[in-house]
Amino acid sequence: MDGTPATRDGEASWEELVTTALLGTDRRPPAAPAGREAPVALLDAAAVATVRRRAGLRPGRAAPRPEPAPEDPRPALPAAAARRLATLLADRSGGAGGGRRGSSPDLMELLPQWLAAANAHGYAAPAPALPALLDAARGRTDLRPAALAFAGPRALWLARLNPDWRFALRAAPGGGAALPGTGDGEAVRRLWQEGLFAERVALLGALRAATPAVARELLEGTWPTERAEDRLMFLDSLRAGLSAEDEAFLERALSDRSRNVRATAAELLSSLPGSALATRMARRAAACVAVDRTADSPALVVEAPHECDPGMERDGVTAKPPTGRGERSWWLGQLVEAAPLGIWPGRLGGRTPAQIVALPVSDGWQGELHAAWCRAAVRQRDAEWSRVLLGSPSAPEAGGPGAVSLAERAKLLAALDAGARAEWVAGFIATHGLSEAFQLLGVCAVPWAAPLGRAVVDALDIARDGGSYPWSFSGVMGLAERCLDPAEATRLDALLAIPDEREDASPGAGGYWAEAFQRLVTTLRLRAAMAAELAPDGTPPRSGD
């Protein structure tokens, strides 16, 4: 015997055939007629077993046919753009991993940008591309919002038929369920009273976008009977279209039995500069900070709160500080953060924000006070205070008046307009180079403005000429591939040659740099071609569009 077990009728089972194929016919030869080669005999046996398995299948029960897929009324993609999408989706490797990437563009990293541009033009996804698009979104959560927006209603139709794509239903408002029109009052009330939680959240969001007052009134009607975790989610929906009309409801929410609900209501109210809560916080914060007029030169003096009274707690101040934090500084920071920034010029002698921040602060309170002003500027998206607290881009990391880390500087930068943001980061790179700038580049508008793009390219060129270890700049290089203006490609041609390597340079660094710049130029030209293919008239958009 050859050692291959057989079924009762002498034929090897399917599992045994698979085992033989895995081990190899040399190690486990199958039963074969004389003169028949073992591999051929194995394939013949597998073919016979396959026919037998299929013949033994019972037909499934008849089921209703699925409803036809909904129509997508958006215009179809241009043919060239459709071909480009197929190419991007076919490149599922996502680059070459942790090794050298070569000079070819990473197509999968261009897919998010392509989807954003296609959505901006309002195109519909080609039906044949939908399965690959959903597979790509399944593997990368960062793709899902843009991919599902581009895929449109047919993505939800497909997701109901394939369990692998159920994430699309979870991401859709109300789990993909159809919502009644905002004008259908009876249907809206019925869904709010009887719908699932996801449907109610989606309904509240849709109403808030169209008729904020109706959404708030709907929520007020059932507020006392909602669960605490549901109240928190519903309350968060009021961020859209938040206005003074919401103040009365939010004031009542300050007395909610849930601490998280109270904190969210207080945060929303502090975003309304004219609210009663903002006025109370302004009064408390102003009592803690004043100008010391007894000194030879003006300075700020701070008297932090000595207690956290019930009124402060009701207005969102957390009484117990984190471990290692003093109570008084913890309370002070919360009061200043929640107070409208507009109160300080009047409180501090009519000074501008720049003059206020420049004043020395007595008794070591400067760090705490400036940090609270930073948080207030981020919360209130106040560009003037953010710019002042950022300080000079040439200052060291902790050199800004209030920003003590790159993460905090990045938050403050987000409050500036795109041009000011790019200008500040370009100045930072010119002084500090790229090693510290990656986090700051992430908040800059794409494509990068010309001064910022030039600063990044110049810094990369300086790093190359200085013999720097090239792989440490791979993250910035990848970001440049996605964010540089494609018009910069021509200016980069001079960087494609392999430079003469310095004696102290990393071995092979010159070849890596030339390869990386070649990939950068190729990617920029590919992005320009993608933009031209998506443009309705076939011409690329102007720089910065």
Image (spheres, helix red, strand yellow):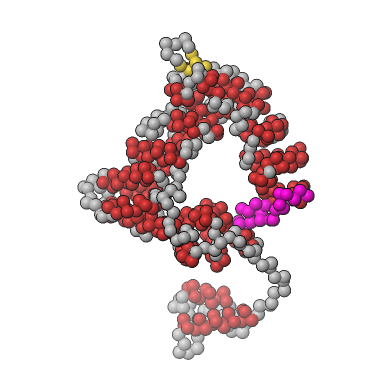
Displayed quadrant of residue 394? top left
Residue pictured at 27% horizontal, 52% vertical: 494
Q: Is residue 466 visible?
A: yes
Instruction: Residue 168: say if magenta.
Output: yes
Task: Name the spot of residue 253 as percent of width and height, x first.
Answer: 70, 33
Residue sitting farthest toward the top: 294
Instruction: Residue 178: say if magenta.
Output: yes
Left or right, 395 with respect to 326, comes to left
Displayed quadrant of residue 167? bottom right
Task: Name the spot of residue 22 as percent of width and height, x first.
Answer: 49, 72
Task: Name the spot of residue 462 as percent of width and height, x first.
Answer: 29, 44
Q: Nearer the viewer, residue 248 or 401?
A: 248
Task: Name the spot of residue 480 as percent of width and height, x first.
Answer: 39, 49
Left or right, 127 with respect to 483, comes to right
- 154 in relation to 37, above or below: above
- 374 in relation to 125, above or below: above
Residue pictured at 38% horizontal, 57% vertical: 525
Residue pictured at 69% horizontal, 56% vertical: 178
Displayed quadrant of residue 75? bottom right
Residue sitting farthest toward the front: 537
- The span picked out in magenta is 166-186
- 525 in relation to 544, above or below: below
Q: Nearer the viewer, residue 359 or 435?
A: 359
